[in-house]
Amino acid sequence: MHGRASGSCAGRMLTHLNSMGGGFERRLAIAPQVEPGGNWFTVFIAENGGRKSYLLRCLVEVALGRHQYVADKGSSILLTAPAKLPRRVIAISGTPLDRFPRTGTRDLKIRRRKMPDDFVYLGPRASNGMAGVAQSERSLVGSLLSNRYRLKERASLLTEAFSSLGLSPRIDVLLQGSSERGGSREKIAESLYTLEQSLGDRPEDEALELYSTMEKYRANIGKINRELERLSNKTEARLRLGIDHATIGARTFIDVPMWELLIRLGHVVITGTRFHRIKHDETVLGDELSSGQWGWLGTFASLAAEIRDDSLILVDEPENSLHPRWQQEFIRELHAMVSNFRDCQVVVATHSPLIASGISEEWGSIRTLTKPTRKGAHVHSKELPTAFGWSASDVYGEMFGLESTRAPDFMDDANTALRKLSMRRPITDDEREQWIKQFRGRIDILPSHDSMRDVLEGIIARLKKQDTGESPGHGKNKNA
């Protein structure tokens, strides 16, 4: 089945996804019109299967001016891009099951890209579909290395991203020669040509530097390969990326631009990273960081290097692997970073009430995607009241439709007891004693300020006073 979709803009802001055949309503609202220079955040919430990730993928395609998107196992959607496209599209993922394009990763190694260089993917999934911390490591190094000339001007953003984890804003990258280095001149020439085609998004001076480095490489292939062999036999080379400069921690004539080229060609591989704690300047190996810490760095440190004015930033399930405290901080940190730039739009898909409640109505909105209840119906976008400052329980109840955030079994027992008491149904002595014992045990494990303690105490008091109302043979009626 084929359809036709377009994204309408105010300036470069995507305000709607106009679609046919994609399963969405014809004019799916994304964001309001914003004054030139302003930024806007939209958080989408929905049940599993609510098509949040699919929507983010459609926004990628539209924002890049694509005319067709064919899902892996779905319909083909024809796209009509808006007249003005974002300068850069940045996809941030907290899940390896996102629908973002696999190209756009910042592991630097060149390949025939299906996406232009103004699309950036920051997440746990590699271009070959494999996922893990190693990809987050390569992605962070790639973002910092390829944007090293911007790091100094963005020192405060990088410092904030690293210091949130108690780390100094620098990273040591361990490098080693790859088994792929060398090869035929034809293969090397093909790799260099492919790399040349991907430089369009770079500022002219940076592109010229890389062109110059490629010429140096062509003229000194043998010498460079021998140097890599020497370094590999001796020790790993160490490349330090910091907010002030990039340096090489080994005696070698290979400079930083050449290291970047060698990584892109696959002749050098990243074997590890080292960080430094602010306190006591202790060294921390990248392998010692948790998936949540890598997720935080991979989002905020990489974004600090990659973001530009006129960026569309799409975020899928950022809450994965993040401690609840970090989920609370996520939107605030993201808003603080984006506020340093103009004409940026952020669209987040989440199941986390801690993330949804971070959106202020002054610069963002929360929308829900409603699942169709009948065949042939479409997914609709509906704006919800602001939840800024709400508790997680209130967001779950009012926006996610949960009657309670407590364990279902916990509430089932209390509700069953209340229902029997309210309807004056018979309660056996054994049943009453079992409930009283159970509820007293649960009172003991609840926090002292939890209002559920009073509810359970009230049930216990009613159980003690309530007649059993049982017929003979089923229990003893004490008031009989």
Image (cartoon, rainbow, N blue to C red):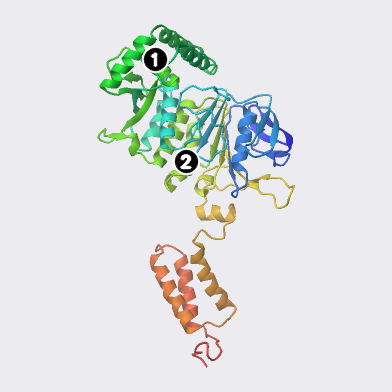
Q: Position of residue 218 (x, y in %)?
A: 43, 8
Q: Position of residue 260 (x, y in %)?
A: 41, 19
Q: Which residue is mark 1?
A: 258
Tell me the amino acid under the disc marked 1: Met
Disc number lying in front (1 or 2): 1
Tell me: 420 left or right of 276: right
Q: State how far apart marks 1 and 2 are (Cα).
A: 36 Å
**Position of 34 relative to 365 (above/below):** above
333 or 21: which is nearer to us? 21
Tell me: 44 left or right of 355: right
Tell me the amino acid under the disc marked 2: Phe
Q: Which residue is mark 2?
A: 330
Please report whichever mark, 1 or 2, sits nearer to the chain's N-terminal start: 1
Residue drawn at point x = 69 percent, y = 45 percent: 380
Tell me: 425 left or right of 372: left
- Mark yes or no: residue 147 visible: no
289 or 479: which is nearer to us? 289
Numbered marks: total: 2
Quadrant of the rendered image containing residue 326? top left
- Mark yes or no: residue 468 visible: yes
Q: Position of residue 170 (x, y in %)?
A: 35, 28
